Image: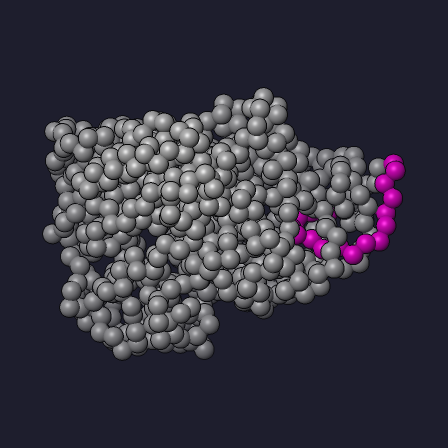
Amino acid sequence: MTPGAATNGHALRTRTSELLRFATAGSVDDGKSTLIGRLLHDSKAILEDQLEHVIRTSERRGDGYVNLALLTDGLRAEREQGITIDVAYRYFQTPRRKFVIADTPGHEQYTRNMVTGASTADVSIILVDARKGVIEQTRRHAYIASLLRIPHLVVCVNKMDLVEYDEAVFEQIVEELTDWTARLDISDISFIPISALHGDNVVERSLQMAWYDGPPLLYHLEHVVIAPDRNLTDIRFPVQWVIRPNSEEHHDYRGYAGQVAGGVLHPGDEVMVLPSGQRTRVSAIDTFKGSVDSAFPDMSVTVRVEDELDISRGDMLVEPDDPPAAARELEAMVCWMGSDPLRPGARLVIKHTTRTTRARLEDLDYRVDVNTLEHLPADELALNEIGRVRIRTGSPLIVDPYARNRTTGSFILIDEATNDTVAAGMVLAAR
Amino acid sequence: MNPLHYELSHLETLEAEAIHIFREVAAEFERPVLLFSGGKDSLVLLRLAEKAFRPGRFPFPIMHVDTGHNFPEVLEFRDRLIAELGERLIVASVQESIDRGRVVEETGPRASRNRLQIVTLLDAIAEHGFDAAFGGARRDEERARAKERVFSFRDDFGQWEPKRQRPEIWSLYNGRIRKGEHVRVFPLSNWTELDVWQYIAQERLEVPSIYYAHTRQVFERDGMLYALSPHVQLIEGEEPFEASVRYRTVGDMTCTGAVRSLATTLPEVVSEIAATRVTERGETRADDRVTEAAMEDRKREGYF
């Protein structure tokens, strides 16, 4: 999709806006695809050939209206069966921001897909059908959003047209969900009454709901402040790759390449190398265009240090005063994505930042009922279940609690036999 | 970038993500390769590879699948660019696959080597033992691509199975494969056509001349303008004429259409892209028009 059309034909300045990633999740009939179609359509990110395709297909299927949901269904099976497989990514742009939508379906594989789509999201959008109110799925969405610590939650109360744009209906949903989310760890939550089908409060302010004085959804997405969501306090720099040209021109060059996962690095800063614990100072921060004065999340840079140390992939440069743990025992929440259940004693591979090592599941403390938040005793975690586990690793990992840093606090588990990614993990504590 | 607020622009964010992907692949795979077409997306890939690995050399060669039906301007540009970069180029030739009997040339006025490339590409991957291949595909290009992972796993037949994709969580890519399997890696997954052009403008990248408006002998077929060339037979009633055109995508001369344009400079091209009402593949690629799922079907077979 060419997002430029969102500018109504005016060329964008070359240096534009921030990037905002948001995740949507929901079932076939809650209007999620219609909402995305509406956002793309009203921000003019849908182009003529795409719209023609939707119109043609809607007619052929006998939908009776332009089915904007067809825009997001990419694969043959999806169009034929009217279902959505897996996570789909969509893009659009306004003069203020570029948006990446991770659109996840709500049926089977629901938790796995939502975790995948939401893992990098700045904003999570939850749709509530105004006629049905808060249902089990709504609570499940909110729980997963809080588990993954998506900084901003937006609840769109959809199909307001079908409840005569009644403020009382909206207010009741707001109240009920506010009570529920008080039990979760959510820092920012907003509620917007919309009709995706008619476009009320999606891009344009609704004329039907004068009682609502907040912004429409798109305005909210354009203005929600995301920069402070990154951890700018604790320096975390996982080394990905060592650059050693060994050429005439760069004979002694030795640079540590990676993407900043936390804090702000400057030349001259003292850093500690983990797991060795050696200290040194940053001598330069290089990019292709030359050296820079600072590096912060999520910049990809190359760091040089003053001393000749043995530093390689999997090591991490960190703040010396408040270093993370170099740990072999993790307590974590995991979302299990494997088709065979996870049981204590399981042997797996763990990938954490740039380090991959072996892992053994020592203990399964409990499983979470994602609908009630109850902790239930469990012998195993089945596909799409979430639980608290203890893991022992083959070599030390340099970890923070996920609550402190989404990059250094997260990991995946891989099945050695199939090579499949079978779990997403979030560190609670480490030693 | 605004040093006071530690914020990145959207292009800087996309760039940092792509560099991260390049370095992960270099570190975790034994024999990566970068697939280069001469098109704008692969030029952006080369610049990102420079950003990821300079002052070192690329830890992989560059490979071009040459259909023999390429625009001559693109081949000339390719050779000059690779020489300037000082990196290694491998050319895999569809003509050779035909000569060796691996594939059979299509015939007739609509004959194209687009589909034949799949065999040449998979043969070259097997011959060199490549376990990861960078490509310039973007998710905004096409509906099937919107569903594809950054690390797109291919079995030992090179096939893509959309229902069996690995979940990609955070930026923790799982690159573990068995012998004979490989991964296609798409660092530009989250870029759009406009992002690519804005980046070309920002980085002042040179692109092949056919991306700018030029006068060319063309003829009209199926609502698209094709270049008159020795590789395409005219159908009765098709009359060549001269027009000012440019290309939005660079594929084969046999399946890539031109658009009417007067945009001769980069800012003019960016303005045109920003104002366009049709997607690049919808407007200029016959290979995607064969059926509704033309791209999905070719991807399953091992296409780029």
Queried whether the magenta region covers residue A421, the answer comes back as no
Instruction: Note whether residue A291 is visible.
Output: yes
In front of the other: A53 or A270:
A53
Q: Position of residue B63 (x, y in %)?
A: 56, 53
Q: Which portion, as a residue range, is magenta? A: B236-253
Quadrant of the frame with the N terminus of chain A: top right
In front of the other: A424 or A140:
A140
Would you place residue A170 above or below residue A18 in this image?
A: above
Q: In percent of the image, x 46 and y 65: which residue is there? A: B51
In front of the other: B266 or B302:
B266
Q: In percent of the image, x 69 and y 35: which residue is there? A: B104
Magenta stretch mostly in which secondary structure? loop
| Apparent side of residue B205 relative to residue A82 in the rendered image (left or right) | right
Query: Quarter of the image holding residue A166?
Result: top left
Q: In percent of the image, x 27 and y 78: which residue is there? A: A268
Q: Position of residue B86 (x, y in %)?
A: 55, 67
Queried whether the magenta region covers residue B240, the answer comes back as yes
Q: In percent of the image, x 80 and y 43: which residue is there? A: B220
Would you place residue A158 above or below residue A412 in this image?
A: above
In front of the other: B111 or A388:
A388
Q: Residue furthest front?
A: A210
